């Protein structure tokens, strides 16, 4: 789970950096999207490198989900009888909502693909016109609100996930003042704000 989590975290960061190019205008954003399809074209052909990245991501997602299911089952086997009363001590809200958060993120990703990749739920989808598709979707109030809410879930998931991955991979030791936990919080906030500012800017008319 930790290894696949790191792969998915790196993808989220790269995806965010690419998405922020929308503030540079339609030409820059569409050029970025086209660049993803043409990178490595002389050696692999158009879109092949992108498909390799997609396959890696799909494998990472499936492996991450499998690890989550196995971890949950191991937890249930270790404690087959629930606590009559549970008072959280060394835990966080993000940790306690990881399972449901993961489910919601899967639902969000499916909608996201239907919106921007396949155009099935986009009110004015134009194949290849990525900037237009983003604006057409996020200028709808409920859609923009749903994207922002999804980023709250993603931020919580990343906060606990990055911290847990660091501990699982042995990159930190137990401490009364866990500095890396604060780093995880900063990263989660940065990703949440970075993604959320896009639907806010579109709905507010800053991005047209």
Image (tube, rainbow, N blue to C red):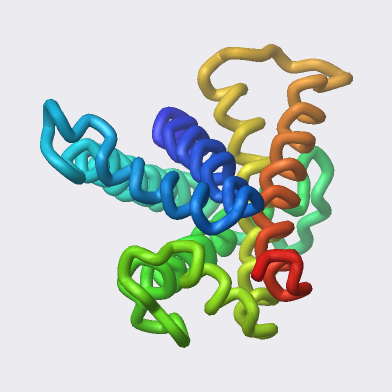
Q: Is residue 146 above or below residue 15?
A: below
Which of these two is toward me, 196 or 65? 196
Residue 15 pos. (x, y %): 50, 44
Residue 195 pos. (x, y %): 65, 54
Image quadrant containing the C terminus: bottom right
Residue 92 visible to the viewer:
yes
**Residue under the image location 64 percent in, 79 percent down:** 139
> On the rendered structure, is 177 left or right of 73?
right
> On the rendered structure, is 112 left or right of 155?
left
Which of these two is toward me, 59 or 18? 18
Residue 103 visible to the viewer:
no
Quarter of the view holding residue 56: top left
Residue 88 pos. (x, y %): 80, 50
Q: Residue furthest front?
A: 27
Image quadrant containing the N terminus: top left
Q: Please count the marks in the image.
A: 0
**Residue under the image location 72 percent in, 32 percent down:** 184
> On the rendered structure, is 84 left or right of 71?
right
Which of these two is toward me, 2 or 47? 47
Q: Residue furthest right?
A: 177
**Residue under the image location 43 percent in, 74 percent down:** 115
Quarter of the view holding residue 57: top left
Q: Is residue 159 above or below residue 110?
A: above
Residue 108 pos. (x, y %): 50, 67
Q: Is residue 72 above or below residue 139?
A: above
């Amino acid at each position: 789970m930790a290894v696949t989590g790191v792969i998915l975290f790196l993808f989220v960061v790269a995806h965010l950096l690419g998405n922020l190019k929308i503030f540079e205008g339609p030409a820059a954003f569409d050029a970025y999207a086209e660049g993803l399809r043409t990178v490595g074209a002389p050696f692999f052909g158009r879109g092949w490198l992108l498909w390799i990245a997609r396959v890696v991501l799909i494998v990472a997602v499936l492996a991450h989900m499998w690890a989550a299911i196995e971890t949950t089952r191991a937890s249930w086997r270790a404690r087959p009888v629930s606590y009559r009363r549970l008072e959280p001590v060394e835990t966080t809200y993000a940790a306690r909502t990881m399972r449901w958060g993961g489910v919601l993120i899967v639902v969000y990703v499916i909608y996201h693909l239907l919106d921007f990749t396949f155009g099935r739920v986009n009110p004015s989808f134009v194949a290849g016109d990525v900037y237009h598709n983003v604006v057409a979707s996020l200028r709808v109030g409920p859609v923009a609100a749903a994207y922002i809410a999804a980023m709250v879930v993603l931020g919580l998931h990343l906060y606990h996930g990055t911290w847990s991955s660091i501990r699982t991979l042995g990159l930190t030791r137990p401490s009364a003042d866990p500095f890396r936990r604060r780093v995880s919080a900063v990263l989660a906030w940065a990703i949440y704000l970075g993604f959320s500012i896009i639907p806010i800017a579109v709905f507010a008319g800053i991005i047209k």
